[in-house]
Amino acid sequence: MVNAVARRSQWQRPLEAVFLPVAALLVALLIFGLFCALAGADPIAVYGSIYKAAFGRWSAWQNTLIRASPLMLTALCTALPARLGLVIIGNEGALVMGGLAATTVGLGLGTAVSPMVVKLAMMLAGMAAGGLWIMLAGALRHYRGVNETISSLLLNYIAIALLNHLVEGPMRDASFVTKPSSAQLDPAILLGTIPGTRVHVGLIYGLIVCLLAYILIQRTTFGFAARTAGGNIRAARIAGLPVGKLTLAVCFLGGSAAGLAGMVEVAAVQKRINESLVSNYGYAGILVAFVSRHNPLATVLVAILLGGILASGGILQRAHDLPDATVLVFQGIVFLCVLFSDSFYGKLPWFQEQVEV
Amino acid sequence: MAAESLGWWGVPLGILAGTLRGSAPFLFVSLGECITEKSGKINLGLEGTLLMGAMSAYGVSYLTQDVVGAFWAPWLGVLAAGIAGMLLGAIHGWLSQQPRVNDVATGIAMIILGSGLAFFLGKPFIQPQAPQLFTFDWGSWSSTPQLQAALKVSPLFLLGVAIAPLLQWFFRATRWGLYVRAVGDSPQAALAMGISIFKVRMASIMAGSFLAGIGGACLSLYYPGVWTERISSGQGLMAVALVIFARWNPIQCLWASMLFGGAQAIGPAFQSVGVDSYYYLFNAAPYILTLVIMIVTCSPQQTLAGSPGALGKEDV
C-alpha cells in the first residue's frame, strides 16, 4: 500500500507541473478568442491562422524556429537568476550589449584571421559583454542591496541609449542611409544555416545552451548550491555557501546567454548593428522564463510556442484585419493565465497524495 | 534661428521648460506607485497603465469633441484615462494577491497586456488630431517665444502638485490613510485591527492606477500631445525607482518628478543649441541618475528608511 502511494506521488508531481500550464494556455486561448470575437474577427478562423502560420507547413516551422532561437537564450537571462531567488529583467540590455560587443570584434578582426576564429571571438565577446552587464545588477544586489529588478531594468535603457549613441556616431557607416547603422559584417564571418533549411545555426546554440543550463542547475553541485541559496538565503549562509560568488556567477551565466542571443541576431539575421536589434526578444524572454517555470528544458518548448505566436503576427494583420499588437495582447493574456495557474499548485485534490485511512 | 539668438541661455531654458512639461507624467505615476507601495504591494505594470491611459485619453477626447465641444472633450479623456487605469489596476490587485503569485511577475505581464491593449485599441487614433487640454500661458508677458513656450503650464501639472500634499495629509492624518499604512507596514497588526488586507490593497492599487492613467493623459493631451506607440519613454517603469528615491513620501515624489522631468530635457536642450553628438547619452540621464541614486542610498544591511515593512514580502 505504502509502495503504491509512493509510486503514485512520483508521477503526480510532474503531471501537475504539466497539467497546470497547459490548462492555463487553454484558458488563455479561450479568453483571446473572446477578445477576437469582440474585435469582430472569427475566433476559430484566427486560431486556424495562428496554427497555420506557426506550425502548419515546414516553411512556417522554419519561421517559428528562427524566432524561437533568440527567445531560448534570452529566457535563460531571467530563468537562471530566478533559481537563486533573483528577478532579473535586463534581458533586452544584455542582448544589446552582446550584439554591440560581437559587432565591434567582428568589424575589428574582419578577415584578418580565419573566419572560424573570428566567429568564436565574436561569440565570446558577446557572452562576456552580456554576462558582465547582468553581473553588474547581481553585484549591486549583493554588495549594495540595490533591487536587482529595477537596476536590470534601468540597465536596459542605458544599453539601448549606448547602442543609439554608437550607431549615430562612432560606429556609423555613412554609406548606409536607410537608418543609422554600423558597417556590414564580412559575409565570411556570418553564421550559416543548418543544412537543408533556412534556419540559422543559432537554433543549435540555443538548444545546446539550454541543455547545459539544465545540467548545470539540476545535476551539479554548483546548481544545487544555487537552488539552496534561492530557497533560503540565510540557511545557505549558515551552511557556508558563498552566496556572493554564486550570485555573481549565476547572473553572469544568465547574462551571457542573452549576450549570445545578441551575437546570433547580429551575425545571422541583421548582419549589421542598428536599432532593429531592439525588437522585444528580451522582454518576450521574460515571459518564456516565467511560463516555463524557470526550467531550462521547458524553456525550449515554450520558446518554440512563443516563436510560433510571434511568427503569426503578419497573417493576423493580412487575413483578419487585426492590428499587429494583437500578438502582444495574446502574450499578455497567456502570461496572466499562467501566473494565475501558479496559485493552484498543491490545491487540486486529484494531484495530491492520498493518505489511506 | 531663434534658438541661436538665445545662445547658451537656451540650455537652462530648455531644461526649465522640460521640467514644467515633462514632470507631470512622472508626478502622477510616482504618486500612484506611492499609494500602491504604501499598502505593501509593488505595481511594476504602471508602464502599461500609462500607455493605456494615454490612448484612452486621446481616443475619448477625439471621439467626444463633437458632442461636448473642444474644451470639455479632453477632460472627459482625462477621466477615461483614470478609469482605464483603474480597470487594469483591478486585474493587478486581484491577481497579485492570489497565493504563490509574484507581484513583480504580474507587473511585467500587465506591462505586456496594457501596452498590447493600448496599441490594439489605439490603432485608429494614430493619425487624427484630438483636442488638447488648455494651458495657462504664464509667459505671455515675455517677447521671447521660447520663454512663452516654456511657461505654458498644464492644469494637470498643477493638479498633480496639489495632490502631493493632499496625499501626504491623507497618509498622516486620516483614518483611511492609517489603514493603508497599517496594511503596508504590519499586515498582522492590521488584521488584528479587523482591517481587510485584501480590500485595502485592492483599493490602493486601483487608486494608484487611476493616477497613473492620468499620467498617461498628460502625455497624449498636453506634452508631446499626440498618440503614438512610442509616446512613453519608460516613465511608468521608472516610477518604481522614483518612489524609492522619494522614500515613499508624496511631497518628495513631487521634487523627484521635477528632477526627472528636468533630466529628461537635458538631451533636447543641448540639441537645441547645436550640441547633438551626445544626444542619446544625455537621454539616458534619468536612468543613470536613478541607478546612481539607488547605489548611493541603498544598503545591504538594512532596509531603507520610510520603506513599508511588508513591501515585497510574502502575503500573510
Image (tube, rainbow, N blue to C red):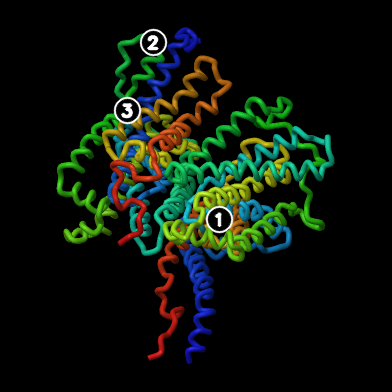
**Where is mark 3, residue-wise?**
B154
Residue type highlighted by circle 2: Thr
Mark number displayed over residue A80: 1
Residue type highlighted by circle 1: Leu
Spatial CA distance of label 3 from label 1 is 46 Å
Task: Name the residue: 71% across, 45% down.
Answer: A123
Seen from the viewer's position, the closer of residues B60 and B297 is B297
| Number of other residues with Cα within 10 Å of mark 3, as a class: few under 14, some 14 to 19, many 20 or more | many
- For the residues beneath circles 3 and 1, the answer to whether they share a chain is no
Classify A111 as above or below B310: above
Q: Secondary structure at mark 2?
A: loop
- For the residues beneath circles 1 and 2, the answer to whether they share a chain is no
Q: Position of residue A176 (x, y in %)?
A: 72, 29
Q: Secondary structure at mark 1?
A: helix
Task: Name the residue: 20% across, 51% down.
Answer: B179
Spatial CA distance of label 3 from label 2 is 19 Å
**Where is mark 2, residue-wise?**
B144
Spatial CA distance of label 1 from label 2 is 56 Å
Seen from the viewer's position, the closer of residues A139 and B136 is A139
Q: Position of residue A142 (x, y in %)?
A: 47, 46
Mark number displayed over residue A243: none
Task: Name the residue: 29% across, 23% down.
Answer: B136
Quarter of the image holding residue B303? top left
Furthest residue toward top: B5
Residue type highlighted by circle 3: Ser
In the rendered view, does B165 fall on the left or right side of B87?
left
| Number of other residues with Cα within 10 Å of mark 2, as a class: few under 14, some 14 to 19, many 20 or more | some
Eye-nearest disc, 1 or 2: 1
In the rendered view, does B57 fall on the left or right side of A226?
left
